[in-house]
Structure formats: C-alpha cells, structure tokens
Image (cartoon, rainbow, N blue to C red):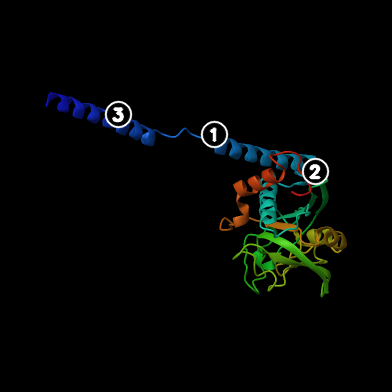
Amino acid sequence: MRKRFLWVTCVSLALSFVIISWTSKVLKPAPVSQASSVTTGSTTQFFESYITNIYQTARLANFGMDNAVFERAMTGFFNLKSANKLPSDCSIVTVVDLAKSSCSKRMWIVDLKKMQLVLNTWVSHGEGSGGDIATNFSNSVDSYQSSLGFYVTNNVYQGKHGVSLRLDGMDEGFNDMAAKRDIVVHAASYVSQSSINQLGRLGRSQGCPAVSAKVINRVINTIKGKTLLFINGNDESYTSKYLDRDMAANFAFNQTNGGGQVTAAVL
C-alpha cells in the first residue's frame, strides 16, 4: 500500500511539473519584435529625407510653396503610383495652393527627377469659391466652385478657351465630378498682372484652374499625359485615401530596395 502511495505521488509530481512547464511556455509573453518599429522608423525617415531633399534642392520655399503642402502632394503621388493611377515613369507633380492669395503665384510644376521647379505661375479659382482667397469648395455641377484634391491629367483638346487639358478627379465626393463639370486647365485673359492691378485679385473661372495665355502651352506640354495635379485649400472637411502617409512611405521605401537611391521605377 505504501509503495502504491509513493508511486502515485511520483506520477502526480511528474504530471504537475509537465503542466507547469507547458503553462509557463504558453503564458510567457513573447519577446517584443523590434522589426516592425525599426522598419516603420526607417521608411518614415527615408520618406521625410527624400521630400526634404527635393524641397530644398528645387528651392521651393523661395518660391512660396509651403513644405507641408508639398509633403501632402508627394504622399498622394506615391499612393496614386501604388494604385496604378499614375504611370511608373511619371515624375512631374503640379501643386496649386488655393489657401494663398490669388495675387501670388500659387501654381508650381516640379520635376522630381531633376529636382527642379519647372514653372511658378498664377492660377485662378472658381467664382463661387470666394474673392481673393478661395474659401468654399464643391464637387457639384454648376456650383462654379473649385474642387480640392488629387487629379490625374488626361487628354489635350481644342475648346472654347483654345488648347485645354482635361482632368480626372481621384477623390470620391470631392472632385470625382471633374469630368462632368468640364473642369480643365485652360488659358484666361483674367489671369494676369493687369487683372490684379484693376481688381486687386485675379479674375475667376467657373471652377477650372485657369492660367495665363502666356504660359498655357508650356503648362500643358509639361503636365499632360497622366501626371499629378494636387489642389490644396482651407477646408477641414477634405479627406483622401491617398493621404495615407505610412502607405506612401512604405511604397517609396520598398521601390528603392530599402531606402537606397531613388530610381526611375519610383519616379
């Protein structure tokens, strides 16, 4: 009887040891992996450095472009590339900042490969959006207001304003009615220094980003063929899935094989 008791006791102890060992392994917290945080930090750092490098090399601050606006444009640029909305060899980004006075040259065309500012010029906003500075925005037909967000340039055609460039809005609910509204880049006589002298601001369009007749050919020839146009403005309601900064940073980072030299595949 005593031997049997000892045998049962030994078996119980052995089972207890096994159960305790198994439980400790299951419940033991897994070591915190540093890979995800390191990768996120690396991609973010690379993305910021890349944008800053272009911003400084192209001297965009000297021509009045805000760094935060350029960063938003670049975020959309990479996310649109990731979504195959822009060609892989696209390297032209056009920024329009309607948060600025119409008297200032608030359109910038940037060549990312050359890291150069191609053109800085005046651009109008819609008459329904406000006077000197645009404050109201709409995606509706006949609103005569400008629409914020990301656009991809489409085909060139001859219209009532002469040579013009169609735009496809990428942001649902904010500018995806651009084609139906005939929102295009075209020339206008009211985009000039004389209009500023006479009115204290530029003349206004029916919602189109109109430019001076003196630069229309240069503008269209530079940005035609599926390049990015980003229109910024003061509207807290504006949102876009293309403003996902982490996604843009990851795409740019991965396309350079881990943050190396930025290649044509990225641009």
- Assign a secondary structure to mark 1: loop
Residue 143 makes an appearance in the image? yes
Residue type for callout 2: Ala
Disc 1 versus disc 3: distance between alpha carbons?
A: 33 Å
**Looking at the image, do the residues carrying marks 3 and 2 touch, with CB atoms under 8 Å apart?**
no
- Left or right of 226 in this view: 214: right
**Residue 58 got which mark?**
2
Residue position for label 3: 17
Q: Give the SS element for disc 3.
A: helix
State which tag comes first along the sequence, 1 or 3.
3
As helix, strand or loop, the secondary structure at mark 2 comes to: loop
- 77 vs 183: above or below: above
Residue 138 place in picture, x, y as percent: 62, 66
Q: Which mark is residue 191?
A: none
First in sequence, mark 2 or 1: give its number: 1
Tag in front: 1 or 3: 3
| Residue that lies at the very extreme toward the left in this rendered image | 1
Percent coordinates x, y for residue 160 in the rendering? 82, 75
Name the mark on residue 34. 1
| Residue sitting nearer the eye, 245 or 194 | 245
